[in-house]
Image: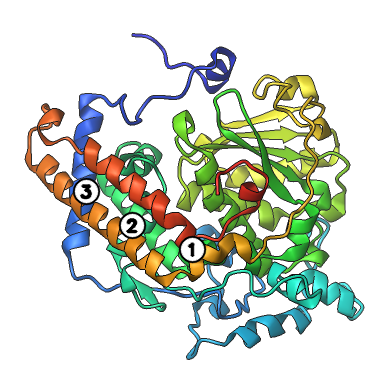
Amino acid sequence: MESTPSLLEHYRNRTPLTDGRVGFLTDTEKDKLRQLWQLIMDEIDSDNQPFPVLYSLTQADSSDDITSLSFEPLVSLSSKDREIPSRTPSQSDIESTSSQAPKKKPTGWLGWISSGQSTPQEEPTEDARLRQHETVQCFVSRNKLDRTLVPAAFQPLFNQSTHERTFRSAFWQAASQMSNPDSWVLRFLRARKWDVDAAMQMLHKTLQWRVGQAIDEIVFYGESLLHYHTMQTGLAFACAKDKLENPVYVVRVRVNLARNRNIQAIKRFLCWQIETSQLLASGQADGRVTIVFDMTDFTRENIDLKLVRTLITLLTSYYPETLGMLLLYVNSFLFSSLWSLISPFIDPVVKSKIFMAKSPSDLALFIDSSQLIKELGGCKPFEYRYQLPTRAENIRMRNAAGREAAESRFAQAIGQYEERTRKWLGGSSRDPGACSRDAACEALHAATVELDPFVRARTLYHRLGLLGL
């Protein structure tokens, strides 16, 4: 029996990962996929209680704990996070948050673990408050650069209430991002080692979390309600492809200063980046991304374990099998202390995808020098400069008739896919051609692409030419 190639061997040979993926399933894995789809269809057909939206973008998230993003026991919700407001604040309520001073909190050597009394802090200046709270939309409005960047109000798919989503609505909003819904479903089976019940539990929990955090609303408003300072400084951005065609994201740790942003800003920024990465991770990438943590010139002030733990929680609990590779580009003695604190919380599977790199030649094992940006010692002449969004690029979102027609075709394609799936589940697992879902899959993908500009604000990567408009 041949041994399974290591991840490093895949990169050396430029061979895509195929185990447990569409087109390369064993008979046993095909049976497991069918079993999970049966549980999914049973849930879609049920009349179970919809998931509540806990954190709409039209309300301020008062939590001062970045890890409130997660429902994991490891990083449990605070009492404030469990409260559901009795009303939905207006747009003026959102904008008013830019003038609110952040709460003082104890700080420790690494900005995460602290003891004793709080460190005395000066009252933030108006400029400091703007840096912490100003969204891209507020920056544009304050400088009179444009009008409302997203010229339409958010409306969930399938005419759902803005306060809740059904399992079916949440499932298709997520699964349709992949060119084949099987690819999204298989992520949960691989993450739970092909335990069908555990995979279904994880999938259900993920959808509950997505609705609670209003991920569809984050995607709809896009950068307009993201933190301007985080976008402008380029904390994290996609800029290349690795040797397996995964999009490469660079996280510049040196620009991360907790005093220059608020917790809500980072929560939304990370979710938006991961959601957007699925548009970039097409073809053989199968939704996977490579992340390079660039620790060049970072200091104690840049270390933020809450941010790192939250990113890891997202990638392991709510976006399983999305992380292809995590490269730690390290040239500082401080990292050994940081790693000793982070590593115990990292899932062993995720840890197997983490590699240390101390030079551009180390990075070149995974990213060709022609794709590696000059900032990291490569040859690609890419320099991050944030390009502000414009109202014009999102003008299709104002076309109510166009959205209605596109959403109707999307709903019809989903109905056809569900119908073919039911026939496939009732047929023979050894005769996939008898109840093929290929045509329905292609129709669903085409309908998803058509609907996208009506329900997703255009992104920085559209403006940079990495994605088509």
* Residues packed near mark 1 inside 10 Å, few (<14), some (14 to 19) or many (20 plus): many
User: Is label 2 or label 3 in front?
Assistant: 3
**In the displayed structure, would residue 33 be above or below residue 141?**
above
Q: CA distance from mark 2 to mark 3?
A: 13 Å
What count of labels does the image hold?
A: 3
Q: Label 1 amino acid?
A: Ile
Which disc, if any, is residue 417?
A: 3
- Describe residue 134's horizontal placement relative to residue 448 as left or right: right
Task: Give the farthest residue toward the top.
Answer: 1
Quarter of the image holding residue 75?
Answer: bottom right
Q: Mark 1 = which residue?
A: 215
Q: Label 2 amino acid?
A: Phe
Task: Give the farthest residue toward the left.
Answer: 427
Q: Label 3 amino acid?
A: Tyr
**In the displayed structure, would residue 260 be above or below residue 291?**
below
Q: Is residue 213 visible?
A: no
